[in-house]
Amino acid sequence: MINRSDRIKAIIYAILAAVFYAINVPCSKALLSNVAPTYMASFLYIGAGIGVGIMYLFHFQKESKTERLTRNDLPYTVGMVLLDILAPILLMMGISIGSAANASLLGNFEIVATTLIAFLIFHEKISWRLWVAIMLVTVSSIILSFAGQDSLNFSMGSLLVIGATICWGLENNCTRNISGKSTYQIVTIKGLCSGIGSFVIATVLRETFPSIKNIVMILTLGYVAYGLSIFTYIRAQKTLGAAKTSAYYAIAPFVGVLLSFIFLKEQITTTFVIALLIMVAGTAVIVYETLLHNHKHMHVHVITHTHDGYTHTHVIEHSHGHDHLINDGKHGHAHSMSELEGDLKHSK
């Protein structure tokens, strides 16, 4: 069982992961006034790759060979890298011409993209609550995408950000197929390869090369917003599990919005407030679905029986999730048991 201090530490890690990532949009918005979007995306990922790569040097000896990527993982790895080249470029372009607050809030559309792709391509089941959440997040994203209250024209900045979230939704579904392998290796490859790919594109486009001062700031931001965010996310995931960690991580867009208003002095409009409330409702449903509806229970059974004249006591532990609840509060479930301890007590 997980003790209280470990759980609190894991929750802190999950919140830190969200905060680390949340600073990406407002800080990038500030830097984009002096840096071209593609170079910005390039050095952000290179910063993450270098930072986590250095951490990987200290972890490398602790890994077994089975944890490392193999030739069979190549298609998903290539897909991950290509999508991670395109997504941050679209995001940086969107931020450069649009509102940082809008871009932060639109980050939650990644949940919709990831879920729908998993449903359509990998045939994963989606509960009715999650469909409601998808609808709310989508409505909020549409509102945020309008250029103005009196205009039917869509904001190009918001559309570019949505394009980035769709790319990351595809990337999430590629990464899920190699998620059992070394996270350090995946993040290092993702950061360096995607960053170098963006660097090549920026050079071909003949964007203005940033100053050394700006490069250092972007590399640092990339290490914190991407590298450390992923690292603390993994630490949280080890204790809380993937579902609960992702629920805490859902606060990231709202932290980004708050930072945008405080540091960039962006204006709060009526349209934004409406979209924000709808997005909060959608995120609340997602968090409820993740933390409460799909929770797991751990049970320990002590079974005593007599065999060949001896009394044996076995301690058996199992866990199960709630796929649904029946009206009377009772529920049925299948047990997957593993014997933890056997023949503990023997008496003649």
Image (cartoon, rainbow, N blue to C red):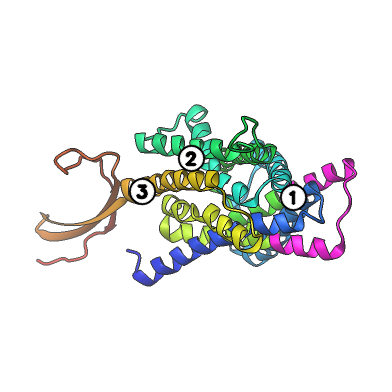
The N terminus is located in which quarter?
bottom left
Using the rendered image of the protein, determine whether residue 202 is visible from the camera's viewpoint.
Answer: yes
Name the kind of residue labelled 3 in the image: Tyr
Q: Is residue 285 left or right of residue 206?
A: left
State the separation of the CA atoms marked 3 and 1. Answer: 33 Å
Tell me which label, 2 or 1, sits earlier in the chain: 1
- Give yes or no for residue 277 being in the magenta stretch: no
Which residue corresponds to mark 2?
A: 137
In x, y percent, where is residue 177? 55, 40
The front one of 100 and 228 is 100
Q: Is the magenta stretch mostly helix, strand or loop?
A: helix
Name the kind of residue labelled 1 in the image: Ala
Residue positioned 73% across, 45% down in the render? 97
State if disc 1 and disc 3 touch (CB < 8 Å). Answer: no
Of discs 2 and 3, which sits in the foreground? 2
Indicate the secondary structure of the residue bearing disc 2: helix
Which residue corresponds to mark 1?
A: 41
State the separation of the CA atoms marked 2 and 3. Answer: 15 Å
State the separation of the CA atoms marked 2 and 1. Answer: 26 Å
- Give yes or no for residue 218 being in the magenta stretch: yes
Which residue corresponds to mark 3?
A: 288
In x, y percent, where is residue 290? 38, 48
The front one of 253 and 306 is 253
Name the kind of residue labelled 2 in the image: Val
In x, y percent, where is residue 87? 68, 42
